[in-house]
Image (cartoon, rainbow, N blue to C red):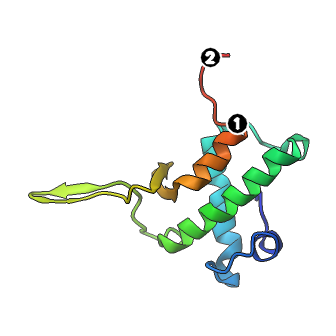
Amino acid sequence: MYADSAYYTGDFAGTAVPEESQVKALTLASDLIDGATHYRIGDGFDSLTAFQRSCIKRACCILAEDAYAGGLLEPGALLAGGFSLGDLSIQAPSNQACMGGVAVREYALILLRATGLMYSGVS
């Protein structure tokens, strides 16, 4: 888990996720970060720069709030995206992105991109 409950409520000043759901939400958020960063962090979180660690911790808190608000901590939760049925079309808001099938705020992706760990091109 890249951010713990103490960081979430203290440094991040988060209030959207109730205390009893914080560990589950932060763990899910950490899993999403691992997928988005191609599992590059692994056990090397402490070897990252202070800037990278800060970005990852803040993104983890944002993703935890998104997971909680989206009902993803409950069994059978629907994943992000949109759908169309006849003339009805529902899409995610423009400030939302999708990470591993989960609707997230674009700001979380901005923070993760800044770390350089999401790069999937040729070096």
Q: Dot 1: what SS?
A: loop
The structure residue drawn at horizontal position 78% and vertical position 42%, both measured from the top left corner, is 42
Which residue corresponds to mark 2?
A: 122
Q: Is residue 108 above or below residue 67?
A: above
Residue type indicated by callout 2: Val
How many labels were placed on the picture? 2
**Residue lying farthest left?**
86
User: Residue at 48% of width from left, 73% of height from top?
Assistant: 71
User: Does residue 90 lie above or below 70 as drawn?
Assistant: above
What is the residue that sits farthest to the right in this orientation? 47
Q: Earlier in the sequence, mark 1 or mark 2?
A: 1
- Give the crowd class for mark 1: few <14, some 14-19, many >=20 residues within 10 Å: some
Q: Residue at 73% of width from left, 52% of height from top?
A: 56
- The numbered mark at residue 117 is 1
Instruction: Say the numbered circle drawn on residue 39.
Output: none
Residue type, label 1: Leu
